[in-house]
């Protein structure tokens, strides 16, 4: 919707080079870092990004992680529509790895009834790590975008954004 309709705000969206011209960016909410996780019972030798290409990786459809891995030449991707479905492909042994943020692991383990100690972070996707933003559709009036930017900057300056983010487990 945010790519085709006016007055649409999307959040949380990763800001990437490919998306830069598709939206009007209104403010960075937080930074995120993606890591490849595996099941500890399945030892995999991953020393760099190139070595990870040998393995099957579960990703979410049209997610920044899928786009990043494809741009780096990864072809062994299993695409899911939902985060829990993607996580279950790892737990069920259908994929070798999944890219997640550290903050995603615990909630997914709880939802899938999996002991998180069974997982291991094996590689950080430094280049894919980015900020999560609010962004408006291109056809949104620039005055609306600017008012949002200014209001958000005030909320950041007075500590409101930090206090709210600190409440997230």
Image (cartoon, helix red, strand yellow):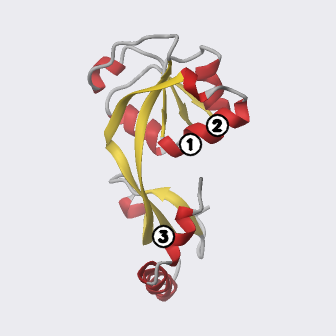
- Which mark is drawn over residue 104? 1
Whether residue 28 appears in this view of the structure is yes
Up/down of 81 relative to 140, above or below: above
Indicate the quadrant where residue 20 lies.
bottom left
Nearest to viewer (mark 1 / mark 3): 3
Distance, label 3 to label 2, CA atoms, is: 24 Å
- Disc 3 is placed on an element classified as helix
Residue beneath the point at 59% across and 58% down: 168
Residue annotated with mark 2: 108
Few, some or many residues within 10 Å of mark 2 (<14, 14–19, 20+): some
- Across and down, in percent, residue 123 comes to 35, 29
Few, some or many residues within 10 Å of mark 3 (<14, 14–19, 20+): some
Up/down of 100 relative to 18, above or below: above
Nearest to viewer (mark 3 / mark 2): 3
Few, some or many residues within 10 Å of mark 1 (<14, 14–19, 20+): some
- Disc 1 is placed on an element classified as helix
Residue beneath the point at 36% across and 47% down: 129
Distance, label 1 to label 2, CA atoms, is: 6 Å
Q: Nearer the viewer, residue 73 or 15?
A: 15
Q: Nearer the viewer, residue 19 or 101?
A: 101
Residue beneath the point at 54% across and 18% down: 95
- Which mark is drawn over residue 162? 3
Residue 126 vs residue 3: left or right? left
Q: Earlier in the sequence, mark 3 or mark 2?
A: 2
Q: Nearer the viewer, residue 71 or 98?
A: 98
Q: Residue furthest front?
A: 117
Q: Nearer the viewer, residue 1 or 131?
A: 131
Distance, label 1 to label 3, CA atoms, is: 19 Å
- Across and down, in percent, residue 93 comes to 60, 14
Marks 2 and 1: in contact by CB < 8 Å?
yes
Residue beneath the point at 50% across and 82% down: 148
Q: Earlier in the sequence, mark 1 or mark 3?
A: 1
């Amino acid at each position: 919707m945010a790519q085709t309709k006016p007055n649409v705000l999307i959040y949380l969206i990763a800001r990437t080079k490919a998306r830069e011209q598709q939206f009007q960016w209104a403010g960075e909410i937080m930074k995120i870092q993606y890591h490849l996780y595996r099941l500890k019972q399945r030892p995999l030798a991953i020393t760099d990004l190139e070595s990870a290409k040998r393995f099957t990786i579960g990703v979410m459809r049209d997610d920044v992680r899928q786009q990043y891995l494809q741009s780096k030449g990864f072809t062994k991707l299993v695409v899911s529509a939902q985060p829990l479905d993607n996580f279950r492909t790892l737990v069920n042994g259908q994929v070798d790895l999944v890219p997640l943020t550290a903050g995603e692991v615990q909630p997914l383990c709880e939802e899938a009834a999996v002991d998180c100690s069974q997982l291991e972070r094996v590689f950080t996707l430094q280049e894919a790590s980015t900020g999560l933003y609010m962004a408006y559709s291109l056809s949104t009036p620039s005055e609306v975008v600017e008012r949002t930017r200014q209001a958000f900057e005030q909320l950041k300056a007075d500590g409101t954004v930090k206090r709210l983010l600190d409440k997230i487990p």
